[in-house]
Amino acid sequence: MKPVSATLLLVLDLLGTFVFAMEGASTGVQHELDLLGIMALAFVTALGGGIVRDLLIGSVPPNSINDWRYAATALFAAAVVFAGHNAVGHIPYWLLITLDAAGLGFFAIAGAGKALDFGIHPLLAILLGGVTGVGGGTIRDILLAQIPGVLRTDIYAAAALLGAAVLVLGLRIKLRPAFASTLGIVACFTLRMVAVHEHWNLPRVLGH
Amino acid sequence: MKPVSATLLLVLDLLGTFVFAMEGASTGVQHELDLLGIMALAFVTALGGGIVRDLLIGSVPPNSINDWRYAATALFAAAVVFAGHNAVGHIPYWLLITLDAAGLGFFAIAGAGKALDFGIHPLLAILLGGVTGVGGGTIRDILLAQIPGVLRTDIYAAAALLGAAVLVLGLRIKLRPAFASTLGIVACFTLRMVAVHEHWNLPRVLGH
Amino acid sequence: MKPVSATLLLVLDLLGTFVFAMEGASTGVQHELDLLGIMALAFVTALGGGIVRDLLIGSVPPNSINDWRYAATALFAAAVVFAGHNAVGHIPYWLLITLDAAGLGFFAIAGAGKALDFGIHPLLAILLGGVTGVGGGTIRDILLAQIPGVLRTDIYAAAALLGAAVLVLGLRIKLRPAFASTLGIVACFTLRMVAVHEHWNLPRVLGH
């Protein structure tokens, strides 16, 4: 998928990596991990989803193992959080949520697009877009011995899947890749932000 | 491994996927996950073991990523459980145990057979048969932040390993593949059912 | 990386596997797992780190799936622990720590060296050396539904990363591979032993 220039894609990817890594590192600080533990959480939160996707579609070594800039970005984000932890605690909640929703959308459409490029069936490509978006946070929660938040909390994975589905369907009806990608990111971002604002949740079985 | 017609094998594989996915989805309902969480648990419970096996033997993309019918079957099973949750709770325990034991046997011999096809040493092929049988449930338990039941509870992994071993030894002494496969499934199924009925357990170190 | 004779390397690798497998099996005994659970913990503790590394660098099937001697060594170590559990509890603490530190150093430099052989960037090769050293114990802790000790406890991953870094830098300045490897193992071993003795810890963010 080369919907826009490769440079712009790389910049977006590294920005998403930075945001997700900061979130992972912050979780590590909250759990009183040491510096290396914080770096490890930053790495897996930011890059774990893409690594799982790449292993599953047969793109090895995974992108973030092949290109040192991803690991460097994640470790730098961890160092920023560690060094300036008082400052980071003061990042406004709405800003963090907004950046995260944008990163989620980008990761989801990038993951689905790469899966399609590797000849994966559209249904699985959508699922792999979701894995790319939420896989890192899931591994982070597993490392912290917690049930992954994405399994029980509001509309997060659903937004990633929606973004991936919009991309896949958009390409199917021959939209230009750059346009389908943008639509997918906007769809994911919008659903996520509205869900946060309105406290939407997915249905669950009651009475258990 | 083509011990019987490819169509029969596919049907058995999808049936096993359906049974395991229903179990995964039911666990999700018990943990009060939302619809997507239930679908995710169904997917990993049914397909996680085979995915790990395929990654380890170098068969990428894994079967269930390559063929959309596996994901569709798992998601459909999750939808059935979600929609008819009252009905599912009423499936008799003995029926669930029986279907699960049959699925376990099939997954174990299919996994060991595929490993042999990829040139894996018989000892490892047996272990990979076990991984195919119990890997999905293990990942499900990890996602639920629980010690995998298979590590501590009665004879389950042992039955999968027995089935895989019977297949591998049967092929070694030149039994026809279809016959060795059937023997392996029967061995796994029988050991599992007797163990449930008799409350057999593996030995453990006492006094700790 | 062929810094010394292949036979010596294999022997060191199997010795490291044996030590790590015994530790994994002992943890299984402490958690009152059955025999198969103990064997599973021994296997993943000893071989999990190398398997993850091999999947990430694209060396599939992983070494320990391709060569039955690794699995056999791990399972034998588990059987030894299971059979002689009273004796194992009497292994002196300092001996266990010392063997573990040596195994950690060997796994770390072997992992980093193999990553370099596969054309991985030096920064990632160092990280993968660390993964090789601590990955197995991390997976073991995940299976036990615990936060991996390596994320919070003293200087362990740091020692593995130091050893890997010494190897990578040593090869960069054209040291002979055998010499760079030895330096790396010694560096890891020394840092680990001093840290245990002096109760060193990595910095963490206070007041959370």
Image (cartoon, coloured by chain):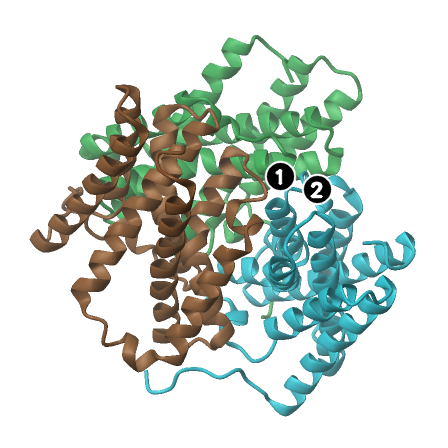
Chain colours: A green, B cyan, C brown
Q: Of the numbered discs in the image, which one, if any, rests on residue B65?
A: 2
Image quadrant in which the N terminus of chain B is located: bottom right
Q: What percent of the width, then of the height, locates residue A81?
A: 25, 32
Q: Which residue is mark 1?
A: A56
Residue at 73% x, 56% y is: B79
Image quadrant in which the C terminus of chain B is located: bottom left
Q: What percent of the width, then of the height, locates residue A2?
A: 63, 13
Residue at 55% x, 84% y is: B201
Q: Amino acid at mark 1?
A: Leu
Left or right: A84 with respect to B107?
left
Q: Of the numbered discs in the image, which one, if any, rests on residue C16?
A: none
Left or right: B46 with respect to C185?
right
The answer for how far apart the CA atoms under marks 1 and 2 are is 7 Å
Kindly check if marks 1 and 2 are in contact, taking CB atoms under 8 A apart as contact.
Answer: yes
Q: Above or below — where is C113 with respect to B23?
A: above
Q: What percent of the width, then of the height, locates residue B88?
A: 73, 71
Which is more toward the observer, B208 or A72?
A: B208
